[in-house]
Amino acid sequence: MKKIISLLVLLVCAFAFIGCKEKEPAKEKDNVLYPEDMEWTILEAKHEKPVEIKMWIPNSATSSMGASIGKLAELYNNFQATTYPGKNISVVVEYQGGSNALNTKLQAAILAKNNPVISAVGVSSVPLYESKAIDLRTVFTYDEIRGLNQGLLQYSLYNGKFMLNPYFPSASNILVVNKTLVEKSGFTLPTPESIINKPEESNWTWSEFLKIAKGVTKIDANNDENSVYGFATSSVDPIGMMFQQNGRLYNDNITDIEFDKNDKIKTGLAFWKSLVTENAMRNPNSRANHGSIITSEFYTGKVGMIFTTSSNLKTMTEKAKEGNFEIEVLPFPKKEVFFTNQGGSGIIILDNKPIEEQEAAADFLRWLTQPAQVAYMCSQTGYLPVNSKAVNEAALEDVYEKTPMMKTAGEYMKFGIRSPQGKAKTAVDKKVNEYAKQIWSEPNKSIDDIVKELISEAKYEIEANK
């Protein structure tokens, strides 16, 4: 195993090459990322005098995210002091205790004009900062943005403005499968490689998934606690089930719903309901603390597949080794196409600070996004790498050797798409998720009635949060 000190030496050695990045234009440009009638001038630090900037991030200095960004800021500051003595940039990281707390403080600080120039924000909070965040196409060239993991740019573009660098993409929803149990039940799982390389040919569909989940299930009529279920979850995934059908819940800026225009919402809810009615999974409403219990049941062989997040892969890999069974990570199956979501936070730069601070923030953000720094952050936190080249760095190679499914989860992000965004997103998502769960909490209510309520409630939340 490579030592952390060796990694840090490699990082420091790599810093000398940062100023040599190429900025040649791409031969063909994505007209969404780079409209033909617009141009961007890259912000460059002048190094004419010392510049101190503040960066806000959620969590504490001792959390994995906090400690890692703190170490990277320290290394950047050392590099700056050595390379530009007396005219260096220095970054002060300030910890805000959590995403909600950071959002509240940051919005208040912007009004008071004492905000930091650079900050982490949650992916769903991007629209709140549209008027104050700079367009990051003044930080990264087109080629640099195209070199990022495109599936992690789901929340980066809002109203035509490239606002968010998804530097802290902590997780995506995935399936972790007890491969040993599934194969003993007589089924063959698709390989991750077959899904990633030829998704259009993959048979990993809703119907195949349901067939396997039902086949693994073995119900003990005398004591259900001894039963084995093929699948377990504590939540519905309305967003995913729409994208998997080439549909969606909302329009681009979430000022209106889209799921009232066809029957895909009904098809999706009927599928999720069938997982219970056809004995593929236990009803999440059948017992208290279901969400925490199913994880233990997965480890003891009473659950074949579990809907979870990539942030749990390290622990699940360790538990599988302890339990002497093999596991696999798969995307949730497709109806028509695969879809993988992005969660976590990203970085914005705010425009109400002096230009030298904005230039310094741009320099720091470009530095953070280099492969060596991304690899270090991901190796310490388990996050998904925003820069695809980071997977070739020693820091991540070591982690991926021990937990290869973490690398696979990152590769599944090729199925991420640009997500609808708007100020109503948090509120309307919560309402849709809440009402969709009626397929389990009120099993006698028809799908039609549930959808009617969903339409009414979603429209209300969108109107109330415009």
Image (cartoon, grey):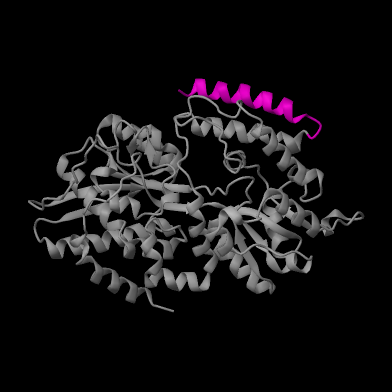
User: Of residues 240 and 319, which is closer to you in this image?
Assistant: 240
| Image quadrant containing the C terminus | top left
Question: Which residue does the image show at 44% across and 30% down from the upper left?
Answer: 253
Q: List x then y, in percent, for residue 129.
A: 35, 34
Question: Which residue does the image show at 10% across and 55% down from the upper left?
Answer: 87
In the image, the segment drawn in magenta is 443-466
Q: List x then y, in percent, for residue 239.
A: 57, 39
Q: Is residue 449 magenta?
A: yes
The secondary structure making up most of the magenta span is: helix
In the depicted structure, whether residue 54 falls above or below residue 434 = below
**Side of 356 where 149 appears, left or right:** right
Q: Is residue 9 something one can see in this rendering?
A: yes
The picture quadrant where one finds residue 61 is bottom left
Q: List x then y, in percent, for residue 21.
A: 21, 59
Q: Is residue 452 magenta?
A: yes
| Image quadrant containing the N terminus | bottom left
In the depicted structure, whether residue 228 falls above or below residue 334 = below
